[in-house]
Each structure stands twice: as structure tokens, then as C-alpha cells.
């Protein structure tokens, strides 16, 4: 709090109404499709291992934890929802809060609202169809265009994302005013090109879905073998804003454990804090996660786009500096 | 001097870039959902006034610049340097013509200016937004013409040439906006 007026919300009353309307529309969209609304804990015993996602911690002390126990605020409800899927829930969705340490800016707030849903038996393309229908209903947008990651780089950055050498990428990124490009990994360099050059151009006449990411950016998605193996992952962009990220989900528990461990190695190399692996998720995968696709969408950003503003704080009652 | 990490950067912070003192005029946090976080920093070079942009990753840092802005009184010039004084400490600094630049035409003795100091030395001199100057030279206007019709060049006591209405005469004082160099009114 900096001034006496900081008790006031940054969103107007009109925006609060708009948010409520969006939530109601989402719920009716999934209700009509027989997708079950679920709630899972915001606190988890293990966070994600992603190199670029940082979970906040909270401490529980009480019955069963006299010495106190560290819990992580979820960065997304993915692990808990996959445990429900493995237990036979069928199609599910959730609207909840997620927390990401270190992320604050015009389009980021460390606490934000996620819509996440899963469709057993579907692949990422079928899920993109449903995403398209949801966006048409919420944003009134035209049917989305679909570009592969390679096509998006070719069209908007003018080079082959898979074929370009690391050195060539560094030269391109150096021209963007990035300092110390030497210290960046290949994926970091690609991210820079994506966020600085490509992303602002995406989703202006209709939403843009980018799919088939480099295998090194698979995260929790399946990798499809081929001459150039690609991750069956997609992202959604509307008016230059990244809105959602989805996967044809990885179901192989051994592969999942390998990815967790390789993340932990990478975290150690960068001097990031050690985190436990979510054994509950691995046990669920071992039991059997149905073949499925899932996606997470930023509801605050969706509200921002619906309202036609470019600043997240216009649609948040109280952003972090007024929390 | 302190260095700043990406959680500390904000508009107004003074930083060193390639050996020059600069001020941050904009920041933007950029992060793909699953990717590396970057901070775009827009900064203005104090000397050239040019605005540039840098992209830094979360682990990068920026070196702080020892830059302060102080209100100082303009005392006098010997034609090569301009002397300013801090009215509280009576400390005096000298700025050369590169630093004073176009501001010199607005400098009137005893006026208060904003002086930007880098490591104690002036790098920018900003005159007051409005100054009152006496006209030392101008063509006599048509007598009795007080209409807003035309204007004419007039030289002021500091050497600045300002377009003034025809009725303004030698010896009169006028108020000038130093940001636009335009005549505001008779003073």
C-alpha cells in the first residue's frame, strides 16, 4: 500500500460484472457438454518441476504436522486433475486460482484465475476445436487459424526454427537488443523470438493456435516421432496475447519420471531451489491415465481481451500491489 | 554504485549503459507461460536524450548511475563555462557549452534551473519552464496596432530570438515558454 486511495479496486464495477458474466458463460458452456466441474486443493505437497515456473510456499502446522510442513501453492491444477482422471472421473473442468512467483507486469499477476479442462479420448486437435467454440462464445471471434510452430517462425520471423543453428539464433536475438545472448539456451533464444517478434503479430483477425512445438519444449505433452520429433502441444494467441496452453497429455509414467528428473538436473545447474517430485501424480500415471487432452486458459487475460483493455489490473479487483 | 536486479528496475531509476548515464523510462515484464522470463527496459541517455531498449533475463543486473537532479541558481558565464550554485550548500558547479547546449539562450542570472549531476558534474541543464526576459532589439511595430494579426522577431537580453506580437517594444519584458520557445504574454 502506497497511498490512502490504494484500498480501492483497480477494476471498475463494470469489469467486475463482466468477470461474473464470463464465469457464468464458461460454466454453462461445460454444463451443456456434460463436463464435470471439480475443485482440487490449491496447496500441494509437490510443485511442478518446470525450469521457468516458480511455486510459492506456505507452511502448515497442526494435527499431523507438529513440526510444520511446507506446502506449495499450485502453479496450475494439472497434477491434481490428472489424479482425478486416472481415478475415472471422465471429462472435468476447473476454475481456480494459480500462483506463480516472480511474475508481475502489465499481463502478469502472481495470483491469477485459470480455467483448465480435460477430455479423455481426445487429442490436441479435437481439443483445439472445442477451444475454438469456447472463444467464439466468449469473444465472439471467428474460427481460429492453426499454424505449426515451424510455420509461425517461417511466416513471421523468416527462418526455420528447427533448422537454424544455435549461433544463427544468437545473432538474430542479439539484434533484438538482448544482452548476454551467450548465457541463453536454445529454447530461451526461441522464446525470445516468439515473444518479441512473433507473438505481437498473432491472433488479430481471428485467434491463432500454434501447435507442434520443439520436443525440448514438450513439458507434459506427448512427443510425436518423425524426421523432426515434435511435442503435441498447442498455445492460443488472441490480439498478440498468449491466452492458453494445451497438451495431448503424456500418459507414460516412466517417461514422466525421466522428464521430472531431467528438470531437476537443469534446476540444479541453474542454482534453482530443489523441489520434490510429485509421487502422487506418478502413481496415478502408473495406475493408468486415460489417453486425453487438456488445456489451461488465463481467465483474467480473457476478461482483459473481452473488455478491450491492455492492462490486467483493469480486470483484477486487487492486483498484487493492492493485495 | 549499487546494481539493480530485475525485481528492482522501475521508471525513474538511473543506470549506466555502455559508459553513459541513463534513466529508465519504461519497463515491461515478458514471459511465455512455460518459458524464460525477460524484462524489457526502455532507457533514455541523459546526454544524447536518445531512447533505446534492452532485453534482460531474470538473472541479469544493471549498474546504477550516480545521477541526481538539483535545483541550482544560475550565477554567471564567462562565455566558455556557466556557473550554478546550490542555494542551500552554496556549492558551485561549472557547466561547459556542450552541457548547457540550447538552454543557454534562456539562462538569466539568478534564475533557478534544474541541473542534472553525474558523479557531481553537470550533464544536463534545464531552464525554468517560463522565463521573463527584456526585449533588447526589435523593429518598431505600427503604432496603435494591438490586434493579434502579425508577429515579428525580437531579441531578448539573453540573446534568444522569439516571435512576438507587433505591439511589443524594446525595453518591455515578456514571458516565454522555454520548452517551445514561444511568447506567452507581456510580463
Image: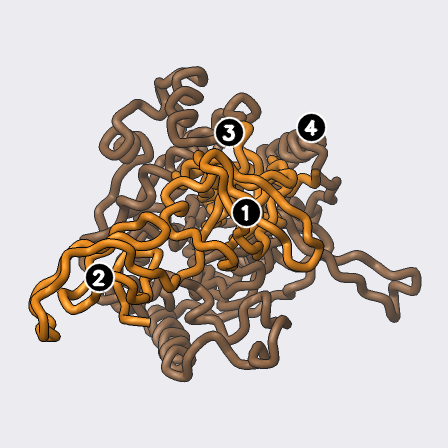
Question: In which quarter of the view is residue B50 placed?
Answer: top left
Q: Horizontal and vertical percent for residue A289?
A: 54, 48
Question: Residue at (49%, 54%) from the top-left corner?
Answer: B109
- 1 and 2 marks on the same chain: no
Front tag of 4 and 1:
1
| Residue in the picture at 47% in, 34% down | B80
**Quarter of the image with the N terminus of chain A in it:** bottom right
Task: Give the crowd class for mark 1: few <14, some 14-19, many >=20 residues within 10 Å.
Answer: many
Q: Chain B is which colour? A: orange
Q: Which residue is mark 1?
A: B116
Q: Look at the numbered disc 2 and give the secondary structure of its residue.
A: loop
Name the chain letter of the residue that bears numbered label 2: A
**Which residue is the site of mark 4?**
A269
- Camera-side residue: A244 or A11? A11
- Do tags 2 and 3 sit on the same chain? yes
Q: Earlier in the sequence, mark 2 or mark 4?
A: 2
Image coordinates for residue B111, horizontal then vertical, percent = 49, 59
The quadrant of the image that shows the C terminus of chain A is: bottom right
Q: Between marks 2 and 4, how big is the CA–CA gap?
A: 43 Å
Q: Secondary structure at mark 3?
A: loop
**In the image, which is nearer the foreground, mark 2 or mark 3?**
3
Give the residue displayed 15% in from the left and 56% down from the top.
Answer: B139
Whether the residues at callouts 4 and 1 have beta carbons within 8 Å, the answer is no
The residue carrying mark 2 is A141
Callout 2 crowding tier (Cα within 10 Å): few <14, some 14–19, many ≥20 = some
Q: In the image, residue B32 lies at what x, y percent?
A: 46, 45
State the residue position of label 3.
Answer: A179
Instruction: Quote the CA–CA distance across marks 4 and 3.
Output: 21 Å
Query: From the viewer's perspective, is residue B132 above or below residue A202?
Result: below
Q: Residue at x 31, y 39 (%)?
A: A198
As drawn, the chain in brown is: A
Mark 2 to mark 3: distance in Å? Answer: 38 Å
Amino acid at each position: 500500500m502506497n497511498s490512502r486511495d490504494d484500498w480501492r479496486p483497480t477494476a471498475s464495477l463494470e469489469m467486475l460484472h463482466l468477470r461474473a458474466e464470463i464465469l457464468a458463460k464458461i460454466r454453462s458452456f461445460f454444463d451443456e457438454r456434460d463436463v464435470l466441474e471439480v475443485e482440487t486443493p490449491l496447496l500441494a505437497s509437490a510443485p511442478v518441476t518446470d525450469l521457468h515456473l516458480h511455486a510459492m510456499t506456505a507452511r502448515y502446522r497442526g494435527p499431523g504436522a507438529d513440526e510444520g510442513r511446507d506446502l506449495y501453492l499450485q502453479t496450475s491444477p494439472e497434477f491434481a486433475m490428472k489424479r482425478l482422471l486416472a481415478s475415472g472421473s471422465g471429462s472435468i473442468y476447473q476454475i481456480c486460482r494459480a500462483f506463480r512467483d516472480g511474475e508481475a507486469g502489465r499481463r502478469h499477476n502472481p495470483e491469477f484465475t485459470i480455467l483448465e479442462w480435460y477430455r479423455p479420448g481426445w487429442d490436441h486437435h479435437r481439443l483445439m476445436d472445442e477451444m475454438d467454440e469456447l472463444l467464439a462464445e466468449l469473444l465472439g471471434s471467428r474460427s481460429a487459424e492453426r499454424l505449426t510452430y515451424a510455420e509461425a517462425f517461417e511466416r513471421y520471423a523468416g527462418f526455420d526454427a528447427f533448422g537454424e543453428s544455435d549461433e544463427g539464433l544468437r545473432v538474430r536475438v542479439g539484434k533484438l537488443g538482448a544482452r548476454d545472448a551467450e548465457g541463453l539456451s536454445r529454447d530461451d533464444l526461441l522464446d525470445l523470438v516468439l515473444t518479441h517478434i512473433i507473438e505481437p503479430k498473432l491472433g488479430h483477425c481471428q485467434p491463432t493456435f500454434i501447435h507442434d512445438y520443439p520436443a525440448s519444449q514438450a513439458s507434459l505433452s506427448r512427443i510425436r516421432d518423425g524426421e523432426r520429433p515434435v511435442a503435441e502441444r498447442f498455445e492460443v494467441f488472441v490480439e498478440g496475447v498468449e491466452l492458453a496452453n494445451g497438451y495431448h497429455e503424456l500418459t507414460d509414467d516412466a517417461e514422466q519420471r525421466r522428464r521430472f528428473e531431467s528438470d531437476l538436473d537443469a534446476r540444479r545447474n541453474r542454482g534453482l531451489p530443489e523441489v520434490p517430485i510429485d509421487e502422487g501424480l506418478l502413481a496415478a500415471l502408473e495406475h493408468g491415465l486415460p489417453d486425453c487432452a487438456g488445456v489451461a486458459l488465463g481467465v483474467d487475460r480473457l476478461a482483459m481481451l473481452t473488455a478491450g483493455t491492455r492492462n490486467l489490473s483493469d480486470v483484477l479487483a486487487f492486483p498484487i500491489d493492492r493485495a | 554504485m549499487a546494481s539493480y536486479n530485475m525485481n528492482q528496475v522501475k521508471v525513474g531509476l538511473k543506470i549506466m549503459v555502455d559508459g553513459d548515464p541513463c534513466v529508465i523510462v519504461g519497463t515491461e515484464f515478458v514471459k511465455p507461460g512455460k518459458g524464460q522470463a525477460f524484462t524489457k527496459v526502455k532507457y533514455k541517455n541523459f546526454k544524447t536524450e536518445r531512447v533505446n531498449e534492452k532485453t534482460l533475463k531474470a538473472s541479469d543486473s544493471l549498474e546504477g548511475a550516480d545521477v541526481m537532479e538539483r535545483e541550482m541558481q544560475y550565477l554567471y558565464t564567462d562565455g566558455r563555462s556557466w556557473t550554478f550554485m546550490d542555494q542551500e550548500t552554496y556549492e558551485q558547479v561549472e557547466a561547459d557549452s556542450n552541457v548547457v547546449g540550447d538552454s543557454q539562450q534562456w539562462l538569466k542570472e539568478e534564475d533557478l534551473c534544474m541541473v542534472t549531476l553525474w558523479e557531481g558534474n553537470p550533464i544536463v541543464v534545464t531552464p525554468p519552464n517560463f522565463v521573463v526576459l527584456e526585449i533588447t532589439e526589435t523593429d518598431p511595430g505600427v503604432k496603435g496596432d494591438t490586434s493579434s494579426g502579425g508577429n515579428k522577431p525580437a531579441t531578448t537580453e539573453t540573446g534568444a530570438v522569439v516571435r512576438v506580437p507587433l505591439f511589443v517594444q524594446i525595453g518591455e519584458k515578456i514571458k516565454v515558454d522555454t520548452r517551445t520557445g514561444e511568447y506567452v504574454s507581456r510580463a
